[in-house]
């Protein structure tokens, strides 16, 4: 049986087809991802290019309200940028940071988890204590702290220039213990099983066994965690940007867009905040819904944190 | 049991040492204690003199020991912005944050228990579905966005609640430390939106936790046995199942209140609430390293203490809980 | 005179997403006052489900789809929940399998005993406490006063099972349903608990339904036995007769597979080949046919009915029933 056939007949696909919420979430997510990836080509204007921004166009309401212009379907922000284009680029930035940060978290977490689970003993105790300690602090607090330190070290100017990699590092460092704990738990569960024993007897080295045999068995949990973590990372990025510790307004993510619009809410220009806000909620919501569904279907033994 | 407590306390002390070490290395690398004391208008010679006097040229470890010793005496450096001891600045801002967190905790407790229990008992009812849907939506909305929407709705559009600040406060002890907003109508009005916003981030989590714990308990043998004993439905649900649900939830509640402090940074920023979070952000923007590090140390101590106490408490309840078969 | 408990063609189904599956398929038996019945079978045969359906406490997707249960002449299977509640733990009480899991960990023993009495009698706390003490003494618990104040986790498994038995006695029930009451306990304590149950049934003239997979225990304790296989009773009759002269090949296999008292010294232990089918893929005809050494073509086509085989024993086996008919014909 080919892999495709196998997939077509799987319980996974069956339950997906039955679950309307999961299907709808998936479709919306795919659309959002396509929009984000293709933003430079489909956006009516480039919000990064200073020469096509006209300050005279600032704070134009969406096209269906009084004073709206069809040129700017969702209105413009305080700098005269087309909201729709800015949101596409913002989503793109948020997703890039979110996905890379989760990749970093997973990388560190899986490495630490595998090492701890396989070597055991003092290394295990040390690494897990470290994870525990970090786990006992709220990740957002940690991210804000690291962000604050970075900003002081680099200065606001360089920080803004380096914002994307810095944010990836900050969010990546703040939440690796989730992965480390789960991977370690499953490694410890698998290590004593017969197939690992067998692999050891035929003379495979420890790292080989880890990566080739044990890791694939933990991938279900990693997948479930990762969906939720991407949602979390995008939220963290938004929070950091909202606090001024993230993307600058000139290259906005959704968080910095919301922040830049916040002060104009009092003068009635709600759209600068509300549209990116809804955009962000939509993205996070569909990921969370998919994550819930995945967890129900795959039902891995997750670490109860 | 006693050995466990000792071990846990030693662990807590070690964690605090590590954190203070991290804090101090940051401070000694990027902080500027001379500026903290005398400001920026000093000649290079005077600076060098001051640095020598403050011991800034001593080896790292000597400086660290001094930092620790001072910290134990309650001296965490001087805030550059406020020109006051950092710890004092933090203590003056703490009451605002504490009131905010307490208010939010109260709201969470009042709503999450009934809703969580109800949706565990009647998972198919309309209200349960609505609650669960709403809680999924709730975890997907960043706390600052909730706050902004509340402001737009209740303050900007409807004009029924104030949008920022603490309103009228009363000096609780007459020494200027604890300005409370709890005793005036205006203060309470100002408290409402920030508290609800802050609660909104944790509420979905608690509803889900209470629901899943309750559902797990309802599946246990001892609940089945309670049915077999012929007890009334009400008694089984509200006495037997609820009490077993309560224990794990309360422990989590303790830890989560700690986590809420993190979210106060966002809530306080939106509502310009003069608490610790607001102060912290101010310190970042103006590079007040001493205040930053003092905040780090204070918040970390709060977490370590809360975690340690919760762990120790849990170890007392644990035997019963474990035997309950709730894993 | 009607029986104390009479079960007629009981059928229990579990409503699953993929359709209903039958857990109990048309069983019938009776129980008289003071009588002790053993329900025997492998796990999954439907013993526990039978027990729970008597007090109408099937876990969620399960429901009684056919048949009637009469208790003291009343059809209790159609009782609404509140009416049934007054019978549960009162006239019919139940003892669960694992005493470690049965008592609520956050309440004292006394609390859990007193609430049971108060659920069924209008009685003061002090008087309820007196009854609780009396019953604790009856199950030979040392220092009963102290036990009332203790939490379950402070007591051993054997002690807890005694307390659970004491709880089941609180309201002087007519029937006790004991679902594998000794499986989770140490071997030495198992015997004590079984002795205690026997003693109590004798002294209070209570009926007992003993659910177990252990034929040895049943043969020592009960007067009547019902052997279950894949949701059906396949042999039913007096314990003595069934154990000594099993009719159904499955019962025979069960007895021969147990070392100890049931088979004679020097006989070989025999293992029944294969496994009991799961409820979702019960083979057509006699459910036991894939494992049966007497299997004939009819066994895969027609489901055998429970029929009288003489000596007060009923069995559901085509081959044995035919043999029985021939014997009768020859005799007649």
Image (cartoon, coloured by chain):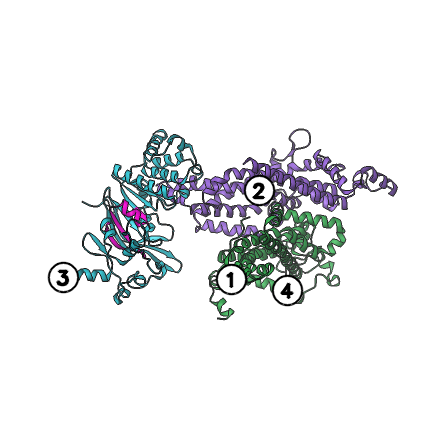
Chain painted cyan: C
Label 3 residue SS:
helix
Q: Is residue B151 visible?
A: no
Secondary structure of the residue carrying numbered label 2? helix
Q: Where does the image place residue C266, in percent across and percent down from the top left?
A: 29, 53
Which portion, as a residue range, is magenta? C210-238
**Camera-nearest residue between C305 and A245:** C305
Q: Are marks 2 and 1 in contact (CB under 8 Å)?
A: no
Q: In x, y percent, where is residue B167?
A: 65, 38
Q: Residue furthest bottom?
A: A2
Distance from Cα at disc 2 to Cα at disc 1: 36 Å
Q: Is residue A248 magenta?
A: no
Residue at horizontal 40 percent and vertical 31 percent from the top: C146
Q: Are marks 2 and 4 on the same chain?
A: no
- How crowded pointer 4 is (Cα within 10 Å; few <14, some 14-19, many 20+) is rated as some
Q: Colour of chain B?
A: purple
User: In terms of secondary structure, where does tag 4 sit?
Assistant: helix
Name the residue located 70 percent from the left edge and 61 percent from the top edge. A47
SS assignment at label 1: helix
Which residue is identified by label 1?
Answer: A23
Task: Tell me the crowding category of disc 3: few under 14, some 14 to 19, or many 20 or more residues within 10 angstroms, Cα based.
Answer: few
Q: Report the residue marked by disc 2.
A: B255
Compared to residue C30, the image places residue C165 above or below, namely: above
Output the chain of dot 2. Answer: B
**What residue is disc 4 on?**
A37
Q: Is C101 on the left or on the right of B175, as rendered?
A: left
* Tint of chain A: green
Q: Which mark is residue C329?
A: 3
């Amino acid at each position: 049986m080919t892999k495709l056939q196998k997939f077509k007949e799987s319980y996974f696909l069956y339950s997906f087809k039955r679950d309307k919420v999961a299907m709808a979430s998936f479709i919306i997510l795919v659309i959002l991802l396509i929009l984000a990836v293709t933003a430079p080509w489909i956006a009516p204007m480039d919000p990064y290019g200073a020469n096509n921004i006209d300050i005279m166009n600032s704070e134009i309401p969406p096209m269906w309200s009084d004073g709206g212009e069809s040129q700017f379907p969702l209105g413009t922000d305080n700098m005269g940028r087309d909201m729709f284009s800015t949101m596409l680029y913002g989503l793109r930035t948020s997703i890039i940071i979110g996905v890379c940060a989760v990749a970093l978290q997973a990388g560190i977490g899986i490495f630490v988890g595998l090492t701890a689970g396989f070597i055991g003993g003092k290394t295990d105790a040390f690494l897990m204590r470290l994870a525990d300690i970090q786990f006992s602090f709220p990740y957002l607090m940690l991210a804000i702290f690291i962000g604050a330190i970075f900003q002081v070290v680099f200065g606001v100017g360089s920080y803004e220039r380096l914002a994307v990699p810095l944010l990836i590092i900050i969010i990546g460092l703040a939440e690796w213990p989730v992965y480390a704990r789960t991977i370690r738990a499953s490694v410890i569960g698998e290590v004593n099983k017969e197939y690992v024993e067998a692999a050891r007897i035929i003379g495979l080295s420890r790292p080989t066994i880890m990566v080739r045999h044990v890791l694939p068995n933990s991938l279900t949990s990693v997948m479930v965690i990762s969906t939720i973590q991407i949602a979390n990372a995008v939220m963290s990025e938004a929070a950091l940007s909202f606090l001024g510790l993230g993307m600058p307004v000139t290259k906005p993510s959704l968080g910095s867009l919301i922040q830049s619009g916040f002060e104009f809410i009092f003068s009635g220009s709600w759209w600068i905040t509300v549209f990116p806000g809804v955009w962000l909620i939509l993205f996070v919501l569909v990921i969370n819904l998919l994550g819930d569904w995945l967890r129900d279907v795959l039902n891995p033994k997750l670490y109860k944190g | 049991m006693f050995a466990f407590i000792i071990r846990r306390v030693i662990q807590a002390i070690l964690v605090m040492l590590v954190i203070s070490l991290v804090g101090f290395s940051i401070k000694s690398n990027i902080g500027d204690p001379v500026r903290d004391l005398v400001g920026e208008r000093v000649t290079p010679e005077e600076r060098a003199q001051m640095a020598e006097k403050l011991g800034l040229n001593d080896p790292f470890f000597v400086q660290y020991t001094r930092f620790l010793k001072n910290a134990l005496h309650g001296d965490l450096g001087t805030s550059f912005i406020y020109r006051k001891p950092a710890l004092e600045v933090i203590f003056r801002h703490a009451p605002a944050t504490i009131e905010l967190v307490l208010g939010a905790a109260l709201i969470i407790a009042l709503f999450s228990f009934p809703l969580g229990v109800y949706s565990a008992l009647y998972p198919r009812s309309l209200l349960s579905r609505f609650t669960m849907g709403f809680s999924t939506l709730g975890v997907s909305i960043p706390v600052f966005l909730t706050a902004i929407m509340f402001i737009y709705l209740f303050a900007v559009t409807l004009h029924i609640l104030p949008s920022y600040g603490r309103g009228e406060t009363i000096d609780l002890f007459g020494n200027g430390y604890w300005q409370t907003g709890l005793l005036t109508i205006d203060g309470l009005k100002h408290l409402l939106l920030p508290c609800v916003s802050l609660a909104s981030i944790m509420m979905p989590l608690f509803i889900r936790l209470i629901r899943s714990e309750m559902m797990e308990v309802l599946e246990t043998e001892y609940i089945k046995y309670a049915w077999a004993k012929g007890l009334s439905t009400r008694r089984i649900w509200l006495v037997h199942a609820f009490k077993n649900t309560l224990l794990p939830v309360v422990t989590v509640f303790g830890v989560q209140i700690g986590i809420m402090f993190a979210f106060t940074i966002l809530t306080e920023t939106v509502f310009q609430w003069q608490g610790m979070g607001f102060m912290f952000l101010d310190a970042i923007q103006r590079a007040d390293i001493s205040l930053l590090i003092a905040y780090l140390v204070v918040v970390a101590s709060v977490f370590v203490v809360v975690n340690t106490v919760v762990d120790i408490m849990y170890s007392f309840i644990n035997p019963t809980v474990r035997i309950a078969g709730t894993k | 005179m009607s029986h104390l408990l009479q079960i007629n063609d009981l059928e229990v189904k579990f409503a699953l997403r993929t359709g209903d599956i039958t857990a109990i398929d048309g069983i019938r038996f009776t129980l008289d006052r003071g009588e002790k019945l053993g329900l025997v079978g492998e796990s999954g045969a439907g013993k526990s489900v039978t027990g729970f359906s008597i007090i109408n406490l099937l876990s969620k997707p399960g429901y009684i789809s056919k048949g009637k249960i009469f208790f003291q002449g009343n059809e209790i299977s159609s009782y609404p929940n509140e009416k049934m509640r007054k019978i549960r733990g009162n006239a019919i009480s139940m003892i669960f399998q694992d005493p470690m899991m049965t008592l609520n960990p956050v309440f004292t023993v006394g609390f859990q005993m007193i609430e049971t009495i108060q659920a069924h009698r209008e009685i003061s706390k002090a008087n309820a406490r007196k009854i609780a003490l009396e019953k604790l003494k009856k199950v030979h618990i040392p220092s009963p006063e102290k036990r009332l104040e203790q939490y379950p986790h402070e007591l051993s498994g054997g002690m807890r099972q005694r307390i659970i038995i004491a709880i089941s006695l609180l309201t002087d029930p007519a029937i006790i349903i004991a679902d594998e009451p000794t499986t989770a306990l140490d071997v030495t304590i198992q015997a004590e608990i079984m002795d205690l149950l026997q003693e109590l049934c004798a002294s209070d003239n209570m009926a007992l339904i003993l659910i177990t997979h252990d034929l040895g225990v049943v043969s020592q304790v009960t007067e009547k036995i019902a052997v279950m296989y894949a949701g059906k009773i396949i042999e039913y009759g007096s314990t003595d007769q069934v154990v000594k002269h099993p009719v159904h090949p499955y019962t025979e296999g069960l007895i021969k597979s147990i070392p100890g008292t049931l088979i004679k010294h020097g006989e070989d232990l025999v293992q029944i080949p294969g496994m009991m089918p799961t409820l979702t893929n019960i083979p057509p005809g006699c459910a036991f046919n894939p494992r049966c050494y007497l299997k004939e073509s009819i066994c895969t086509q027609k489901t055998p009915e429970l029929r009288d085989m003489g000596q007060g024993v009923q069995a559901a086996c085509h081959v044995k029933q035919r043999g029985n008919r021939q014997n009768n014909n020859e005799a007649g």
